Image: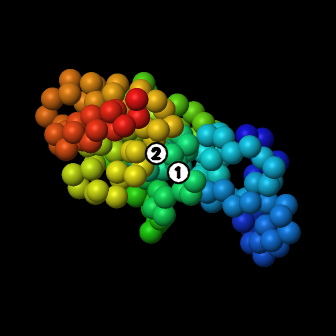
Amino acid sequence: MHPAFLYLPGARLSQAELSAARIDGHLVELGEAYVPADLVETADARASTLASLVQPGTAASGPTAAWIHGAGDAPPAVHHVKRSVDRRLRPRTSGRLVYHDTLLAASDLQILGDIAVSTPQRTLLDLATALHRDPRVLPWMDQLARAFPGLAAESATTLRSLRRVPGSRAGSAALERLAVRTM
């Protein structure tokens, strides 16, 4: 997405000016930024709004990546990133950002809106294996599986082929239920 269409609070306009433009109907909130009201909301546009949170060497993952790929209307309240480089990082974190220090393989990454994002299949696998710890990821799984028909069945097959993955039993069961629902 071209940077001219992205309005970050405090960059070109203050938060008050952006809020006034939103009230007037010229801009809408999208992620951490504002965009023109008539802009088509794409994965690139969603990812671009999070560029200030996803620092170099990390990639959007989990519910954040699911939202970028088209799951849900609103972004998650807390964003998730994973390490995407071989070296260890000293991430900037906040109350709105969770950093997972597990390496995402290059094959599990794609570039959207100038940031790295986990692929839809990797995102669904991550959500499925996190389900036993956090049942709040289930709606993100459901919406991502609906956005990509056939992804749940493909991910269930992939998860069954992996060995010694924490949460794989609960994740496989959830993916199989989603595969039946989204076919």
Is the Cβ of the residue at disc 2 closer than 8 Å to that at disc 1? Answer: yes
Dot 2: within a 10 Å radius of its alpha carbon, few (fewer than 14), some, or many (20 or more) residues?
A: some
Q: Nearer the viewer, residue 105 or 90?
A: 105
Q: Hey, what amino acid is under mark 1?
A: Gly
| Residue, disc 1 | 72
Above or below, 145 against 78 in this view is above
Above or below, 135 against 1 in this view is below
The residue under the point 52% across, 31% down is 110
Which mark is on residue 26?
none
- The answer to whether residue 104 is visible is no
The residue under the point 83% across, 64% down is 25
Quarter of image, res 2:
top right
Q: Hey, what amino acid is under mark 2?
A: Gln
| Residue, disc 2 | 143
Counting from the top left corner in percent of width and height, residue 125 is at 33, 37
Q: Which colour style is shown?
A: rainbow
- Which secondary structure lies at badge 1? loop
Counting from the top left corner in percent of width and height, residue 106 is at 43, 27
- Which tag, 2 or 1, sits closer to the chain's start? 1
